[in-house]
Image (spheres, rainbow, N blue to C red):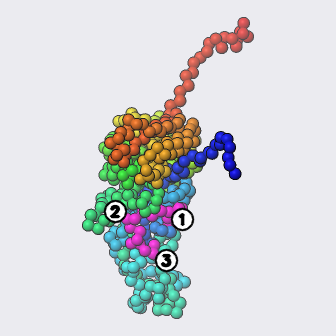
């Protein structure tokens, strides 16, 4: 049929579907009782993604011995199981049963109902020698099975009809893991150019290419208070994979910081002044359980962000921390009021105060008070910059190597303005992006380089609200005189 007249055909707007990155996936470096797993060697210095605390415990083992010198990764498992049920979490275990171990002296263990419990934590199953009371050697999976109970103790179960079935005692010797032998250098880690193997904090590089998740929070509970570890963690947070940014959560040493006024010197002496770190003090207490504040705050932030569209615009300060007290390593409790907590904040340290329950208190990054740049000193502003940059990279990664034409420019500008506009005015004041000719000269175009300029405006916190009160004598007089 012949057409006659003027016609309009609308073409779909070319937009890029945004990739919403989780803004606060914790990456935790430390030790786990991997001796409890089927293949301990495969759990050493490799990033392991767990979608629940239960999954983490199954993959890495679990122990209540999780403070300094123990299985520190289990602090995060406890927090995400019992305080804030949030996921996912990436764990990096540095404990190597082939290296961090000590002897399990030969001893006899009572057999009850064909079971004997080796009441020593950390048993390395491949090292065990088991004999019955007649000194007859017993073979694993032939004469007995081996598993771990909730306390982390190895349980030997004799197999009916096999050697040892009538034993009343078992003589056992072997080796146990020794997390106390781990050093700060092993936590910091290294890269071996001869093998290409990475260890410790260096494994953080593998998280995105291996697991396809962007780290949001970096922590090394019971280790980060050591200056070398904390500074290395902050450096990692500032640039991951050459493009991504995160926040390092660093604890101050409570052995050296006994009063709130000590936090200033402790922070300065530690060198925790990066905009990509938050400095925390003291430790948290949940009943009799003691946790590094970095663990509690990581779980709290991840939970808060997950409940708010994975956009880190809210400040965790003045929110319930979910703990029962504040303390030092030895359990000694400390009680801060708002005045003392604010003094700690003035040093660029985040703490907690009891105001109808224990609440996190403080909004500054480690850069305060040295820096006054709002994008660097305010925790949520810095995290919004991190999140937006990380999300921009993920969203437009697929456009790299596309023909550099007007269609590409318009697609990115239009997509980004629509995407960013959806967050205003609730999550930030606004954001704009533009492509300027002066930023993209012919020499850059020939070199395959294109530059955009984007401005974003995350909100600063209402940190100080003042109400000026005065005595109104006219109001008083009018009341007493009946308005005459």
Vertical relation: 336 (above or below) 69: above
Q: Which residue is mark 3?
A: 147
Sequence order check: which comes first, mark 1 or mark 3?
Answer: 1
* Lateral position of residue 238 relative to residue 461, left or right: left
Tell me the residue at 33%/63% (across/down): 198
Residue at (34% x, 62% y) in the render: 199
Quickly name the residue at label 2.
199
- Residue at the spot of label 1: 54
**Other-residue count near label 3 (Cα within 10 Å), few / some / many at <14 / 14–19 / ≥20:** some
Between tags 1 and 3, which lies in front? 1
Which portion, as a residue range, is magenta?
Answer: 37-57
Camera-nearest residue between 304 and 1: 1
Give x and y (percent) for residue 111.
49, 83
Marks 2 and 1 sit apart, C-alpha to C-alpha, by 25 Å
Q: Earlier in the sequence, mark 2 or mark 1?
A: 1
Q: Is residue 421 magenta?
A: no
Q: Is residue 81 shown left or right of residue 229?
A: right
Residue appearing at x 57%, y 36% in the figure: 425
Q: Secondary structure at mark 2?
A: loop
**2 or 3: tag closer to the N-terminus:** 3
């Amino acid at each position: 049929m012949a057409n006659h007249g003027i016609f309009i055909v609308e073409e779909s707007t070319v937009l890029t579907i945004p990739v919403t990155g989780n803004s606060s996936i914790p990456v935790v470096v430390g030790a786990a009782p991997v001796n409890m797993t089927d293949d301990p060697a495969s759990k050493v210095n490799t990033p392991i993604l767990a979608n629940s605390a239960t999954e983490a415990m199954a993959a890495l083992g679990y122990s209540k011995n999780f403070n300094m010198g123990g299985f520190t990764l289990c602090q995060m498992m406890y927090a995400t199981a019992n305080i804030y049920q949030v996921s996912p979490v990436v764990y990096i275990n540095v404990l190597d049963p082939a290296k961090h171990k000590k002897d399990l002296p030969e001893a006899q263990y009572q057999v009850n109902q064909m079971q004997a419990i080796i009441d020593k934590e950390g048993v390395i199953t491949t090292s065990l020698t088991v004999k019955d009371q007649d000194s007859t050697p017993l073979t694993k999976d032939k004469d007995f099975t081996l598993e771990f109970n909730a306390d982390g103790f190895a349980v030997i179960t004799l197999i009916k009809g096999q050697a040892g079935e009538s034993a009343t005692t078992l003589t056992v010797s072997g080796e146990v893991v020794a997390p106390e032998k781990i050093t700060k250098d092993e936590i910091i880690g290294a890269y071996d150019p001869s093998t290409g193997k990475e260890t410790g904090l260096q494994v953080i590089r593998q998280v995105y290419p291996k697991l396809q998740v962007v780290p949001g929070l970096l922590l090394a509970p019971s280790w980060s208070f050591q200056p070398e570890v904390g500074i290395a963690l902050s450096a990692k947070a500032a640039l991951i994979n050459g493009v991504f940014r995160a926040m390092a959560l660093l604890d101050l040493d409570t052995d050296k910081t006994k009063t709130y006024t000590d936090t200033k010197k402790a922070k300065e002496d530690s060198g925790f002044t990066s905009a990509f770190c938050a400095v925390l003090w003291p430790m948290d207490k949940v009943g009799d359980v003691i946790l590094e504040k970095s663990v509690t705050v990581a779980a709290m932030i991840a939970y808060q962000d997950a409940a708010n569209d994975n956009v880190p615009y809210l400040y965790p300060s003045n929110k319930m921390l979910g703990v029962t007290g504040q303390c030092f390593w030895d359990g000694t409790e400390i009680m801060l009021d708002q005045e003392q907590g604010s003094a700690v904040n003035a040093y660029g340290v985040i703490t907690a105060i009891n105001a109808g329950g224990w609440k996190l208190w403080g909004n500054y990054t480690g850069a305060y008070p040295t820096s006054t740049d709002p994008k660097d000193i305010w925790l949520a502003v810095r995290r919004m910059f991190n999140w937006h940059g990380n999300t921009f990279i993920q969203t437009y990664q697929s456009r790299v190597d596309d023909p550099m034409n007007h269609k590409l420019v318009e697609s990115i500008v239009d997509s980004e303005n629509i995407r960013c506009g959806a967050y205003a005015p609730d999550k930030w004041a606004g954001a704009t992006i533009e492509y300027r000719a002066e930023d993209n000269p012919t020499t850059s175009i020939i070199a395959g380089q294109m530059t955009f300029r984007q401005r974003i405006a995350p909100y600063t916190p209402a940190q100080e609200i003042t109400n000026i009160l005065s005595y109104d004598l006219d109001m008083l007089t009018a009341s007493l005189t009946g308005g005459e």
